[in-house]
Image: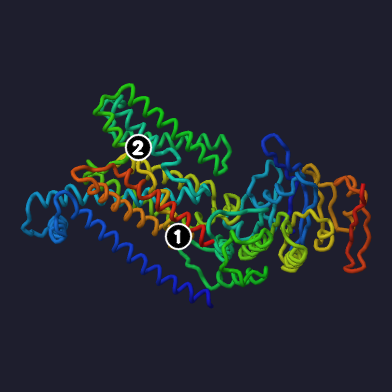
Amino acid sequence: MRAAVSRQHRWWALVALTVVAVVLLAIMISLAVAIGEIAIPLSTTARAVSNRIFGTSFELNRIHQGIVWDYRLSRALVAASAGASLALCGVVLQAMLRNPLAEPYVLGISAGASTGAVCVMILGLGYGALTLSGGAFIGAIVAFLLVGVLAAGAGRSSERIILCGVAGSQLFNALTSYIVTTSANAEQARGVLFWLLGSMSGVRWSDVYLSVPVAIAGYLACLFHARALDAFAFGTDAAAALGIAVRRVQVVLFGITALMTAAVVSMVGSIGFVGLVIPHAARFIVGPSHHRLLPATALGGAIFMVFADIVSRIIIPQQILPIGVVTALFGAPAFAIILFRARRSV
Amino acid sequence: MSIAVENVAYAAGKTIVVDGVTLAVEQGKVLGLLGPNGSGKSSLLRLICRLRRVDSGIIRLAEQDIAAIPRANLARRVAFVEQQATTDTQLTVRDVVQLGRTPHRGLLSPWGVDDDLAVEDALARVDMAHRADQFWHTLSGGERQRVHIARALAQTPSELLLDEPTNHLDIQHQLEILSLVTRLGVTSIIALHDLNLAAMFCDSLAVLQNGKVVAAGAPQEVLTEHLIARVFGVRAHIERSAVHGRYNIQYAMG
């Protein structure tokens, strides 16, 4: 009886929290559109969006209309969906591998994507048939398979998988450095550096049409497996004893995280720390149950990434910082704080 | 028969772990699985709940081959308590016990009154109801074991498999847990190290050595001084206890 009442309380707290998070995300995206070298009032933003979506005909400065729609809104939407995807990958990998350090960046998937991109950009692999994004996508999948094979050979304990990820990252980073130092000119090297640190410039609506569906489909697939993710808390044997089809769930969820990461990295480069920090922060707020944790993580990742993008554009006047630098600069201290607070609450 | 194991063999790599084991447990009875370390007790339990697949032989639950039972259906029948399973996730005692309801819930079915009742009942049975909101990682080894058993009870199984459930428990809780399990009326197989506890609580015993059953039957038939010397390499003196009427084993030094 008491459990039921307290559950009802928690239910309302959850609804309130969700509303707050969604509103926060909307505000964040509006700010991302408004803030920049040319400040655009929110009212103009609203009108520009309404002109394009609802076919209204507010009189607007053509340049403002263009900046809002073609440049900043698409960028904010890609940032939000990429943040949600990366954070979801982190939470799923952490649950499946039972390791709090697991995330796409640590497991070498992002490094593989970078190598793939560099192969196309500098070595000209694919003879023009393969775009930079295509190369990154293939690189991410190859890296994921390689780490998977390494881990299967080394025994499937969770520390070993992280070590395999570290080994994979080192290998791909070395390959990338080798290609860059032996074959790249100065301009290409600068382009690669940007890719390695993550970059939102050059994002267009075509990216939105890929990145938003990927985030939503990935989210729904993860939510579908929320109970299985809970059951992994005590390991694969315990999950199987609770009736979870462990092998099938592993194949499906690892596959989904690989595809989501590959899609994100192919658009915006490798961005670290989102997959690591956001799931821990979300767990701290809503607890370990994946029915609550997955939505909290997705929203948290989206808000954080849009915020990081805003900061990357305004922190240095006249210059845009790679977004990966910002996520790491904010993420690392936040992570430390989470660790300390979690320890104190024990 | 509630559980019937017929001529089952299993090898991990090239090492034969379970070697032609045949045994059976009647509905509602408790079978004690004895044997030295590495004799195949844990592996046999894992085979019975299909965490590992048999290389040959058949395991039946109520006459049905477990290989033909879907995993979720199997988990609604058979609950398994592993040795020392732990987690880094910040779960409360209640969270852990609620995991036991996993196989009973459909994809869209919300948490129900039945689930609440099963969880509360399981917590009460292992005397952990008052600690339901405490975090898992603050519990002692014995308390964790009791929570695992509560999780298994929340599964409302008709067959219960326990791998050395009294490890880490103080003597009071050893007795409590075993008398709790034996009073459930659920068909149970318990891997045990303590021969006296096995004699006190089990309806029948099976002794494993190098993956083979070397003795099986009622406790008084199985536990002989000769067998204990042969399997465990220990001299023992056995007599009927004046206190509880069951067999009591005293070990001789040297």
Q: Which residue is mark 2?
A: A137
Within 10 Å of the Cα at label 1, are there few (<14), some (14-19), or many (20+) other Cα atoms?
some
Residue B54 image-quadrant placement: top right
Q: What residue is rendered at 46% in x and 34% in y?
A: A168
| SS type, badge 1 | helix
Instruction: From the image, state whether disc 1 or disc 2 is nearer to you.
Output: 1
Decide which of A129, A290 is in the foreground and name it: A290
Chain of the residue displaying label 2: A
| SS type, badge 2 | helix
Q: Is residue B128 left or right of residue B225?
A: left
Q: What residue is rendered at 47% in x and 54% in y?
A: A339
Q: Is residue A245 left or right of residue B204?
A: left
x, y (%) of residue B232?
Answer: 85, 47
Tell me the tag on residue A284: 1
- What amino acid does circle 2 point to? Phe
The vertical placement of A188 against B111, above or below, is above
Disc 1 to disc 2, how far (Cα)? Answer: 32 Å
Q: Is residue A27 left or right of residue B69?
A: left
In the rendered view of the protein, which quadrant contains the N terminus of chain B?
bottom right
x, y (%) of residue A171?
Answer: 44, 30
x, y (%) of residue A17?
Answer: 37, 66
Q: Mark 1–mark 2 contact, CB under 8 Å? A: no
The vertical placement of A288 against A273, above or below, is below
The vertical placement of A123 against A11, above or below, is above
